[in-house]
Amino acid sequence: MIDNPAAAMDLLDKLQAALPVPARLTPELRASLASKNAGAPVPPDGAIVALHYMGDEGGIVCRLDLGAAMQHAAFVSITHLRFDPRLPLARKIAAYQKHRVKHLRRQGP
């Protein structure tokens, strides 16, 4: 099991109550989005406007609002986002991300 279901649902509920939540995109995510949106500049920041829990395998998935220039909607794992440490939920998000990445690495390829 990758996620702690109770902790994931608790975080999901708290994030949904706080929407929209500002987030920074990782360089890898920006590069991936740029390849799918030919010619459109990918901003370094966006806002989470919707959340879904995709089960143990998918974890918490966020729908990002990246502005009108983006051709396609972006749905990304919360592990590919970074958050301002001053956000009230930043510590809970970081703990979820760390736990999830650790357990994914343990599973191997």
Image: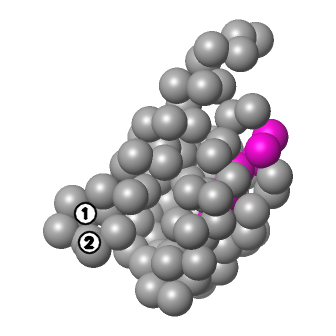
Please state which of residues 23 and 34 is positioned toward the viewer in this rendering.
23
Left or right side of 97 for 108 = right
Residue 16: assigned label: none
**Label 1 environment density (alpha carbons within 10 Å; few <14, some 14–19, many ≥20):** few
Label 2 sits on residue: 87
Residue 84: assigned label: 1
Residue at horizontal 64 percent and vertical 66 percent from the top: 9
Asked if residue 87 shows in the view, the reply is yes
Left or right side of 72 for 32 = left
Give the total of numbered labels. Answer: 2
Span colored in magenta: 56-63
Q: Is residue 2 above or below residue 22?
A: above
Q: Is residue 49 magenta?
A: no
Residue at horizontal 26 percent and vertical 72 percent from the top: 87
Say which element carries label 2: loop
**Label 2 environment density (alpha carbons within 10 Å; few <14, some 14–19, many ≥20):** few
Say which element carries label 1: loop
Q: CA distance from mark 2 to mark 1?
A: 6 Å
Q: Nearer the viewer, mark 2 or mark 1?
A: 2
Q: Quadrant of residue 51?
A: bottom right
Residue at horizontal 78 percent and vertical 44 percent from the top: 56
Residue 63, image x and y in percent? Answer: 66, 71
Residues at marks 2 and 1 touching, judged by CB atoms closer than 8 Å: yes
Q: Is residue 89 above or below residue 35?
A: below
Q: Amino acid at mark 2?
A: Leu
Q: Amino acid at mark 1?
A: Asp
